[in-house]
Image (spheres, grey):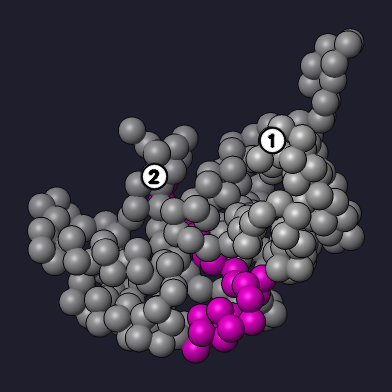
Amino acid sequence: MTPQENFDFVNAYFQRVSPEVRGHQGFIVKYLGDGLMAIFPERAEDAIAAGIAQLQQMQQFEVDDFGLKAVHIGIGIHHGPMMVGIVGEAQRMQGDAFSDDVNLASRLEGLTKFYGVSMLISEQVLAQLGADHPYQVRELDRVTVKGRSQPLRIYEVFDGDPSQTRYRKAQTRRHFEAGIHCYQVGDFVAAQGHFRAVLQIHPEDKPAQLYGKRLAGLLSKPPKSPWTGVSEWGRK
């Protein structure tokens, strides 16, 4: 794209997704190039509902004028305390939010690219939802990320995926979550069987593909140190 086409594209994108933040009791703290940081002060569920609405907007996004077939975005959601305010100096000020929890939300957004999913939430967000939440969620991994030493469980919310993808993920969720459990306890053969079952029904499942590759490596070269089932991202 030319610089002007880039500006037009990004602004067209923001015109689609920004109203969904406000429409779900949130507010935009700042824009980050082609992304944004938003805060939902009332409920974690508001953030998830806004994210799903944004993903649905992207399915309707007219991209023909930009020569693109599809636009994929990633959303990371975490829950915790933070300080929101104004930073800068007299001639240039902007909103910002500071806390370790803000950083973790950013890490989750980055991980959507590696796992090939549209929305990741932390275990803290899932706890806020309660047991009777209406969303389609599956556990994805236990991870440690840059700036954190304790493992964190992360979950995929796939309500914002296209209808056929949602159906396949719901259809294979039992095998997928069984595969996650076997992987975490070190039963690699059983885990491989479950993920193969997932891929037979849903060959495009990106996390299942990722685990298939991981397990092939672990079975050919078993880990020497005690197995923790934790994936380390960006800690070196």
Tell me if residue 163 is in the magenta stretch. Answer: yes
Residues rendered magenta in the picture:
150-171
Measured as percent of width and height from the top left, residue 212 is found at 28, 69
Q: In the image, what residue type sits under mark 1?
A: Thr
Q: Looking at the image, is mark 2 or mark 1 nearer the viewer? A: 1
Q: Residue at x 58, y 83 (%)?
A: 164
Report the amino acid beneath label 2.
Trp
In the rendered image, the vertical position of residue 204 relative to residue 232, given as above or below: below
Graded by Cα atoms within 10 Å as few (under 14), some (14 to 19) or many (20 or more), the crowding at tag 2 reads few
Q: Earlier in the sequence, mark 2 or mark 1?
A: 1
Q: Which mark is residue 87?
A: none
Report helix, strand or loop for mark 1: loop
Report helix, strand or loop for mark 2. strand
Q: Is residue 202 left or right of residue 103?
A: left
Q: Report which quarter residue 17 is drawn in.
A: bottom right
Q: Is residue 212 left or right of residue 168?
A: left
In this view, 70 is above or below 37: below
What residue is at 38 percent from the left and 82 percent from the top?
198
Whole-percent x, y for residue 231 in the image: 34, 53
Contact, CB < 8 Å: mark 2 with mark 1?
no
Q: Where the C terminus falls, by quadrant? A: top left
In percent of width and height, residue 34 lies at: 69, 41
Q: Which mark is residue 233?
A: 2
Given residues 152 and 21, the one toward you in this image is 21
Q: Which mark is residue 2?
A: 1
Mark 1 crowd level (few <14, some 14–19, many ≥20, 10 Å Cα): few
